[in-house]
Each structure stands twice: as structure tokens, then as C-alpha cells.
Amino acid sequence: MSKNILIIEDSSTMRSMIAAIIEEMGDLVITEAASGFEALKALPTRNFDLIITDINMPDINGLEIVNFVKNHPNYKNIPLIIVTTERSEEDRKKGLALGAADYVTKPFKPEDLQKVVRRIIG
Amino acid sequence: MEEKKKEESHLEFIAEAEEIIELISKNLITLEKSQGKPPQPDVVNAIFRGVHTLKGIAGMMGFNNITEFSHTLENLLDAIRMGKLPLSGAVIKLLFESVDNLRNLLERVSKEGNDNLDIAKLLSNLENILKKGHEDDARHRLEELDLDPNILKVLTEYETHRLEENIRLGANIYEVTAGFNLETFDKDLSDINSTISTFGEVITTLPTSGASPDVGIEFRLIIGTKEDYSYASSLLSSNRVKVKEMRYERKKEKKIKGEEREEAEAQTEDVPSSVKSLSMTVRVNINRLDKLLNIVGELLLNKAIISHISKDLRNMQGLTDTAIELEKAARTLDKKLNELQEGLTEVRMVPISSLFDRLTRMIRKLSRESGKIIDIRIFGEDTELDRLMVEEIADPLMHIIRNAIDHGIESQEERIKAGKKEIGTIKLSATQKGNHVVIEVEDDGGGIDFKKVREKGVEKGLIGANTPFTEKEAIDLLFTPGFSTSKTVTEISGRGVGLDVVRKNLVKLNGIIDIETEVKKGTKFMLTLPITLMILKALIVQVGSEIYALPINSVSESMRITSRDIQTVDRREVIKLRERTLPILRLDEAFEMKSRRGSNEKVYVVVVGSGSRRIGFVVDSLLGQQEIVIKSIGKALSSIRGIAGATELGSRKTILVLDVGVLIEEAIEGYKGKEERITSLA
């Protein structure tokens, strides 16, 4: 059965790049959200197997997404990968403490992201 | 990635990078304008985020120069947004140069497919300025504070900094909890956000599953504001939204700073009245102020009665001590009541800056949506206006600005072709002229083409094909209902509301709207408004074919009678009211209108005044109660006694407002010419 993946990223270039990298991995259904709001609306629409979220976004930041998912009765088992930058080590630590499964640091190579995704959803 | 995908993401990168660079440059213009003041955090952060995103995507695409350059630029902006580097003129200049450099790099990418330009010099300039920054000494202060650790856990570094900064500046921190339906939460939340932005800053928005996670979602917003709890709560609280104060121990030294600031403010205000000083520390619901003003109105009526009794007393007894004392007291009362009225009016005044801020945000948003870059210039934001007026003119101004962006300012290509500056300008200004405030919205767009206005007017059948047509008439045509020169309905201004509605709203506020326009140069809208908006509840009555308004605070009751109930005592017309006689005044006769009533016809008596100075106005019908704004009437009509002013009813119909005090005098004195007029109620 194909896996459902939600990508939350406000930069359209970054979002489609991540989608393209993951699509190469095969049988996956990808949902893209351009903001935290869109993500909150997308969450009830499918049973997601993985969420990949940017941290630095307006309105609702990625840490808040992690916190929301990990404390929500319906979503708390969905693993999350946070996309961080080398600048925000503090944010990365916070994300992992809140329950994110793993992280990648921008800029990353396609293989880096694929490796992390594979490790989590097999 | 496959080749095709690579090419696609290449194009996507250029498009997004262009967008980001434009956004940065617009925000820089805003920053440049607010130089000298502390930079607006949302503006600095928007620039930072733009550069941050650019760095991220350039890094992924392998454009090393853009990545390196935006990395250094990002460091600089981070230092600014974290308060480690002051935003000086030199820094702003360097930021503008950096944006130009990013544009050059991007152009290279789009033409040559690489970003090989020499950026060394600008890079070292950036690094040199960065060295001047200092470490933020406010770090970790939050840990000393009594804040919910669950919230600190989810704040990004920047949000943490904003929270610290708000606390450092002595702001109040509130937690706003709001529960919404999953379907509509984004709209609901953005409504709350825009309310908050009028008085404070949203530091973070934290979603939680809430009590019913399948259908609803809850948000915790942490906001910082200078306003007190009751103000924040009165604007935000509802059955779905709760506001809670987040307490923290303020450091002593900071507190002293806050007090000093207040003292400094107090010293610059040299208004002696105690009412004014209250306005610095107390927030009052405007409705309460209106209530007080109404009470003052009633007191003025009573004062008029006392003055009169005092005069009567003097006439009967001569200049006795009692008469003199009473007259003195009446005069003092008069003076003090006027002061009270003025003071209360003054309390309602607010600077127009909050409205201008809102408009600026809207312009930014619209310019983003329309793809037109717009430079916003603001003048006179300290000009004060009645709070209610500020609210009432927001919509008309937004409409005018929408028009300016949508129809006024041309696209970049058109502007370049016309030899104009690539960036359009919108100027917002406010100036006080006597008892009026003039607000101008000026754009440097294409101006209004009167030929087109004429064509459209003919097409719509609003004017004849051969009717001579002056500029003034063209402008009048723009304000005619059903007129719109826009060919297509756009998202920005195609809302089915035309300038006719704008004018109608302004007229309601006793304002005037004028347009100056020059083809290819631009258009200027000038709104002239009275500084205060005296709102009064009035009873609307009909007398013959005329309609009048009576200030409701002078009306005690009204009843239906037939003409037969009217008797004549001592050559005066009276009716019986609860075993007492009440003199009446037929308003149709008072205004010398022909009466068409028969003796059986039902009429209404409106009882006004109080005590011995109580009479009944005879009117044909009562049309209801309404809030009205009293406007003064021109000199030509000012000699007519018994008229306090005019007002506009909904349908743009002008009616007269009766001066009840004078009419009572006239009736009681039996239309004897009186030399002195008592103070009118209005």
C-alpha cells in the first residue's frame, strides 16, 4: 500500500524540490501544504504516514506543528522530520525534544533526505 | 532528479527568488521611512525570512554565490532582528545595495544559468558592519520569569527574542485562547490577528487539539501589547475567545524606566484639565463616553431653565441678593458645563496613526497581490481625530486605496514606457485645518481619463451623447451610483461598491470629498472631515411634508390625540395631561406651513422640556428614533429661530434638527421677539 506524506514548507521551490526527491522513492502519495494553516486543514483528510516540516514559517512555526501533532489524539503516532538550518541549532534541539523523529539541515543532498525518510517509513 | 524536473525547478527558483527580492525591497523602503524609530519587528523579520528562504533554495540549487551572499546578509539581518545591531542609515544603505546585488546575481542566473559575479567587496562590507554588533545582554531573562514552560518549548529563537523584547519594553503579555471549527479556523484566526495587530504584536500562534479534536481546533496566541487587560479583553473576548494575563516579574530597573517615560509624557502635555490626564491612563469604552455626553446635553437643557428662572426672578423682584446669587451660579454652571463638554469631546480624540498603519498593511498586501511595487509615504500621522470618526473613515479610505492600486498605478512595464519611476507611490497624509482634518490619498498613477469617463457615462445612459461636459461634471459622474470605469472585475476593487458609496459614507460624517487628477501624473483624493462627530439620538417626526429631528434627551414622552383634545386657555392652546394643562406648539404653524388637518384627525404630541418649561409639540407622525450627526447650517439659514442644525438621514435626505430650547421659549413667551437666545441644546 502506498504511503501518505505531508510536506509543510512555505517556499514553493523548496516544497516542490522536497516532493521531487521523495517521489523518486516510489509508491508514495504526497500532499503539499504552503503554511501551518494549510497543514492543519490537510491533516484530517488522510492517514499520513510521515510529515516533513520546515521550522521557520510565518503564523504557525514548525515547532508548533510538531507539538500539535505529538499531542493530538488522532495524529500523535505520525512521525515528523524537521527541516532546519545550521543557524538554528536551538530550534532543532527543541524540535527533537518535542518529539520529531529526525531532521535534515538545509542545504541537503537528495540522498540525505531519502535516507532519513527510508529509515522512518521503511 | 531528472533533467526535466531540474529545468522546472530552475524556473521555479527564479520566479520565487524574484518574488522574494521584490518583497525584501518593499519592506526595506518601509524600514527606511521609519528610520529613527525602533524598526518594526514584523518588517525586519519579513526581510530576514525572505533572505533566509532565498539562501535555502539557492543552496539546494547549487548557486554558491547567492547562497554565500545571502548567508552573510542573513547574519546581518538576524543581528538586527535580535536587537544586536542598530538599524542605522549606513546599514539601510548597505541593505539596499545588497538587494541590488541579489537582483544582479539572479539576472545572471536567468541569462547565463550561473551566478558567477564578483561579490567579494560587498561581502566584506557586510562583514565589517556585522562586527560592530554586540551580544544581546537580554538572553535567558525569560528563564527567570514565571511563564508556562510548555510555551517556551515551542518558540523559535526569534519568537523567544520577541517575547523577551516585549517584556524588556514593559509590555503586557496576554494569552488568547480561541476555539474554532476545523473548516473555518483560518478565516476566524486571521480576523483575530488583524484585531490584535491594531494594538499589539502576535508573538506566537500555538495550535492544540482542543476538547473535540475531530471537528475543532484550539489556538493559544501569545501577544504583547502596551494596552491593559480590560482593553485587550473588550476587543477580543467572545464565547469562543478568552484572554488571560500572563504574569511575569518585571525587573526593578526596567520598571523605573517605564515610570520615567510616563513622567516625561506627562510633562510635555500642558493641558491642565484633569479629564485629559485621565486619558493617559484609563481606557474607556466609547459608548460610556457617549452616555456622559448625552447627560451633559440634558444638563445643558436644565441649565437653560435655571438661567431663565433667574431672569424671571430678577424681573419680578429686581436685583435682590437671591437673584444675583442665582444668576452668578447659573453663569458658572454654564461655563463649567461647556468645559465638561469640551473635555469629554477631547477624550475621544486619537491620533490617526493606527488607521494609517492598518492602511499601510493593506497597501503592502494589495501590492503583493497585484504585483505592483508601491512606495508608501505617510505624513501627519500624529493628527488627532475623533475615535469614532477614525473607525468610520477606514472603509472609505480602503476603497479609495484599492482603486488607486487597481486602476491608478500602472504596471511596471507601463510605468517604464511612460518614463516614470518603476515603483509607484501612494501618499497618505493628514493635516488639521481649524475644526477640520484633511486626509489625502495621492497616487502617481495614470490619473483619471475624462474621455473614458464621458464614454462610459454615455454608454450607461447617465449623460446624453452631446451634453457639454466639464471636468467637474466628470468627477460628479464618478460618484454617481451605477458608474464604474473598470472593464473587468478584479479581486482588488471589484467588490460591487463604487465611489458613490464612499461619498455617501462621507456625507453621513459631515465630510466632503474632492478629487484632483491629471492624466499620466496621478490622482489625489481629499477628504475633509470635522474633528469630532457629535452623535445624538433623535426622534424623527413628520410635520406636513417636512421631516424634523428632535434630540431625544429633551423628549419626555409622546402621545396620540385628536385635534379635538386641544383647548384654548388664556388664548393659548393647551391639552390636558394627567390633570394638568400642557401648552402646545403646532410646529406647522411655528414654521408657517399650511395646515391641512381637520378636527377629527389624529395627531401626535411630543412632550419636551421639564417643570414649568414643558410643552407639547404637535406633529403629524413619529417616524422612529435614530442616531444623527448634527451639522451646522449655512449663514443664510442661521437666522431662522428654532433650528439647531441639519442632519443627513439614510437616504441622503437632509432634514433640520429642532432647537428645542428656543422653541420652548418662543412658545411660552407667545412668539414675542426675544433679544436673548438661550443656549441651544445641540
Image (spheres, coloured by chain):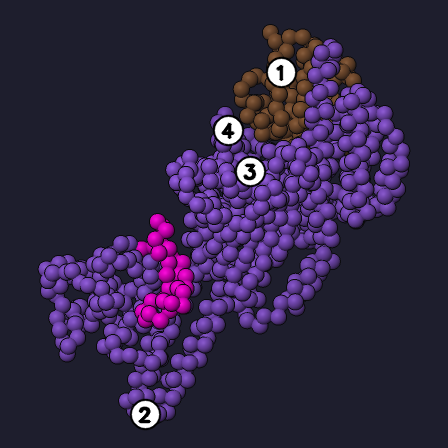
Chain colours: A brown, B purple
**Tag in front: 3 or 4:** 3
Task: Find the magenta span and give its range.
Answer: B625-654
Q: What number is the disc on residue B182?
A: 4
Q: CA distance from mark 3 to mark 4?
A: 37 Å
Q: Quadrant of residue B361?
A: top right
Q: Amino acid at mark 4?
A: Leu
Q: Which residue is mark 3?
A: B407
Q: CA distance from mark 1 to mark 3?
A: 40 Å
**Which residue occupies the foreground of this view, B138 or B227?**
B227
Mark 1 and 2 residues: CB-CB less than 8 Å, in contact?
no
Q: Quadrant of residue B402?
A: top right
Compared with B317, B63 (above or below) is above
Of marks 3 and 2, which one's residue comes earlier in the chain? 2
In percent of the image, x 64 and y 34: which residue is there? Answer: B414
Q: Secondary structure at mark 1?
A: strand
Other-residue count near label 1 (Cα within 10 Å), few / some / many at <14 / 14–19 / ≥20: some
Q: CA distance from mark 1 to mark 2?
A: 98 Å
Magenta-colored stretch includes residue B412: no
Q: Amino acid at mark 3?
A: His
**Circles 1 and 3 on the same chain:** no
Chain letter of mark 2 equals B
Q: CA distance from mark 4 to mark 2?
A: 80 Å
Q: What number is the disc on residue B86?
A: none
